[in-house]
Image (tube, rainbow, N blue to C red):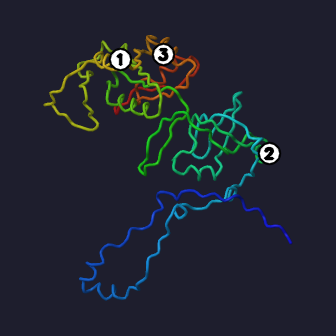
């Protein structure tokens, strides 16, 4: 008797959140009192509604190696690396010696991590199998496993799923400008909340400090004024604070604050010292000088810079 073909190992996983049952009809009484609809209602066949209960009914079955075009590789042959960029389903992974690989994510891994919008993110430590033999010797792999994350910078999408932007960093560098564009304390607050949620140490770089003396009174900020959410109008009577006041306020709360300028080199050595031997996430509004600052901190990057847009 011929042996049955191995169809793969079965695994139970949660249903997709957006595949819910249609809502129950709740207008039976109104339909009965409506003469035009009563006749159709009386023709409805009565039946007992039987609904499955228990944890088993809330999950679905998947088969581990079903539908994956590339073959499985023994775990002892897997390689390790860190994800340096993600473009759709393609991840660029670097081994500890710097060797680059182009990897896709094993379909079953994406299914098992369905609660997350991004099962693999920049900074993830991954185990991947070598599939070069099937791609004419090109360094192509399949990510088989993602190591447990020590920290995350994330946000939730409209469906409530966690979207991890960066994993396994230990610092968040918040770059803001004191002018052009003007300082926006409420944006700094949002970054600080994200850092605290993801267990990241925040560093605030108040960039373009050389423009502080050139800032017109309009460049000063009102404490608590989130103009993107509330129009305070000309009658707003809240306390007016200068940029220096804002910096002192954050420092009094215990945050590391640096006064920097890519033009004059102010604070660059201090910033370089804060970044040394750390995995740091860079964040900040468009136009605050992130690329210019990095080009000064690490010469040779040659990051493209542009003029500040009117929207900023």
| Residue bearing the label numbered 3 | 271
Q: Quadrant of the C terminus?
A: top left
Q: Quadrant of residue 27?
A: bottom left
**Between 85 and 264, the one nearer to me in the picture:** 85
Labels 1 and 2: the sequence-earlier one: 2
In this rendering, is residue 271 above or below 6? above
For the residues labelled 3 and 1, the Cα–Cα distance comes to: 16 Å
Q: Residue furthest right?
A: 1
- Residue at horizontal 70 percent and vertical 58 percent from the top: 9
Q: Position of residue 108 (x, y in %)?
A: 63, 53
In this rendering, is residue 43 above or below 250? below
Q: Which mark is residue 53?
A: none
Q: Position of residue 55 (x, y in %)?
A: 52, 61
* For the residues bearing labels 1 and 2, Cβ distance under 8 angstroms: no
In this rendering, is residue 55 above or below 169? below
- Residue at horizontal 65 percent and vertical 49 percent from the top: 106
Structural crowding at the residue carrying mark 3, measured as other residues with C-alpha within 10 Å and reported as few (<14), some (14–19) or many (≥20): many
Structural crowding at the residue carrying mark 2, measured as other residues with C-alpha within 10 Å and reported as few (<14), some (14–19) or many (≥20): few
Q: Which mark is residue 251?
A: 1
Q: Position of residue 248 (x, y in %)?
A: 31, 16
Structural crowding at the residue carrying mark 1, measured as other residues with C-alpha within 10 Å and reported as few (<14), some (14–19) or many (≥20): some
> Element at badge 3?
helix
| Residue bearing the label numbered 2 | 133
Q: Nearer the viewer, mark 3 or mark 1?
A: 1
Labels 2 and 3: the sequence-earlier one: 2
Q: Is residue 103 left or right of residue 217?
A: right
Labels 3 and 1: the sequence-earlier one: 1
């Amino acid at each position: 008797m011929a042996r049955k073909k191995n169809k793969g190992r079965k695994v139970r996983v949660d249903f997709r959140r957006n595949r819910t049952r249609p809502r129950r009809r709740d207008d039976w009484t109104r339909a009965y009192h409506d003469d035009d609809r009563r006749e159709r209602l009386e023709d409805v066949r009565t039946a007992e509604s039987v609904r499955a209960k228990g944890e088993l009914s809330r999950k679905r079955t998947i088969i581990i190696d079903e539908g994956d075009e590339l073959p499985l590789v023994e775990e002892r042959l897997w390689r390790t690396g860190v994800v340096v960029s993600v473009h759709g389903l393609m991840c660029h992974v670097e081994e500890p010696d710097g060797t680059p690989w182009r990897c896709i994510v094993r379909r079953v891994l994406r299914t098992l991590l369905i609660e997350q919008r991004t099962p693999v993110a920049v900074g993830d430590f991954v185990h991947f199998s070598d599939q070069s033999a099937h791609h004419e010797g090109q360094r192509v792999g399949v990510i088989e496993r993602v190591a447990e994350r020590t920290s995350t910078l994330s946000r939730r999408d409209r469906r409530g799923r966690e979207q991890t932007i960066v994993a396994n960093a230990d610092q968040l560098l918040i770059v803001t400008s004191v002018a052009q564009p003007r300082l926006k304390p409420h944006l700094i607050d949002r970054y600080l909340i994200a850092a605290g949620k993801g267990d990241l140490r925040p560093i605030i770089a108040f960039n373009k400090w050389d423009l502080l003396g050139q800032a017109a009174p309009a460049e000063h900020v009102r404490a608590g004024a989130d103009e993107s959410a509330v129009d305070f109008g000309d009658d707003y009577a809240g306390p007016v604070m200068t940029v220096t006041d804002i910096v002192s306020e954050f420092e009094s709360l215990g945050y590391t604050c640096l006064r920097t300028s890519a033009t004059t080199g102010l604070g660059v050595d201090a910033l370089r010292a804060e970044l040394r031997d750390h995995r740091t996430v860079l964040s900040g509004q468009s136009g605050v000088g992130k690329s210019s600052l990095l080009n000064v901190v690490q010469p040779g990057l040659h990051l493209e810079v542009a003029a500040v847009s009117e929207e900023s």
